[in-house]
Image (spheres, grey):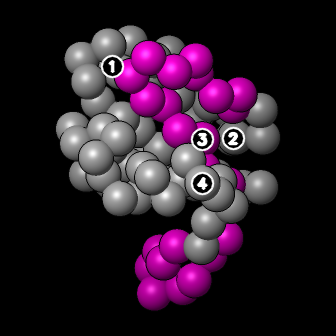
């Protein structure tokens, strides 16, 4: 699942560490992705079960509020999230 909110891409999976994109993000946080037919660059913040929440400085204000308030509790249910925002 993925959605765009406040200029950031929020991506989630129930596969957790088994997901290849999660493995890729653990190895390298700087990403290139496609949105609206254009290649873009950003930095991924990975929210994963059992891991401390990543710093969200640099995200736009509303994206940061959602990431800080909603994603850490959701990881308790086994979900893994990435928020891709500006570098």
Q: Residue at x 61, y 66 (%)?
A: 31
Left or right of residue 18, residue 55 in this image: right
The label nearer to you, 2 versus 3, is 3
Query: Which mark, residue 74?
Result: 1
Closer-to-camera residue (74/9): 74
Instruction: Tell me, yes or no, if residue 35 can be seen here.
Output: yes
Per the model, the C-alpha gap separating discs 4 and 1 is 23 Å
Q: Residues within 10 Å of mark 4 (few under 14, many from 20)?
A: few
Q: Earlier in the sequence, mark 3 or mark 1?
A: 3
- Span highlighted in magenta in the image: 33-56
Question: x and y percent of residue 66 in the render?
Answer: 50, 26
Q: Residue at x 54, y 85 (%)?
A: 38
Q: Does dot 3 land on a helix, a strand or a loop?
A: strand
Q: Which residue is label 2 attached to?
A: 60
Q: Which residue is label 4 attached to?
A: 27
Question: x and y percent of residue 14 in the render?
Answer: 21, 38
Q: Earlier in the sequence, mark 4 or mark 1?
A: 4
Q: Earlier in the sequence, mark 4 or mark 3?
A: 4
52 magenta-colored: yes
Per the model, the C-alpha gap separating discs 2 and 3 is 13 Å
Name above or below for residue 26 compared with residue 55.
below
């Amino acid at each position: 699942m993925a959605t765009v909110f406040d200029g950031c891409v929020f991506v989630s999976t129930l596969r957790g560490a088994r997901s290849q994109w999660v493995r890729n993000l653990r190895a390298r946080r700087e990403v290139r992705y496609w949105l609206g037919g254009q290649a873009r660059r950003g930095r991924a913040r990975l929210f994963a079960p059992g891991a401390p929440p990543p710093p969200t400085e640099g995200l736009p204000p509303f994206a940061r509020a959602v990431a800080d308030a909603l994603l850490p509790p959701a990881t308790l249910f086994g979900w893994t999230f990435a928020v891709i925002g500006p570098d």
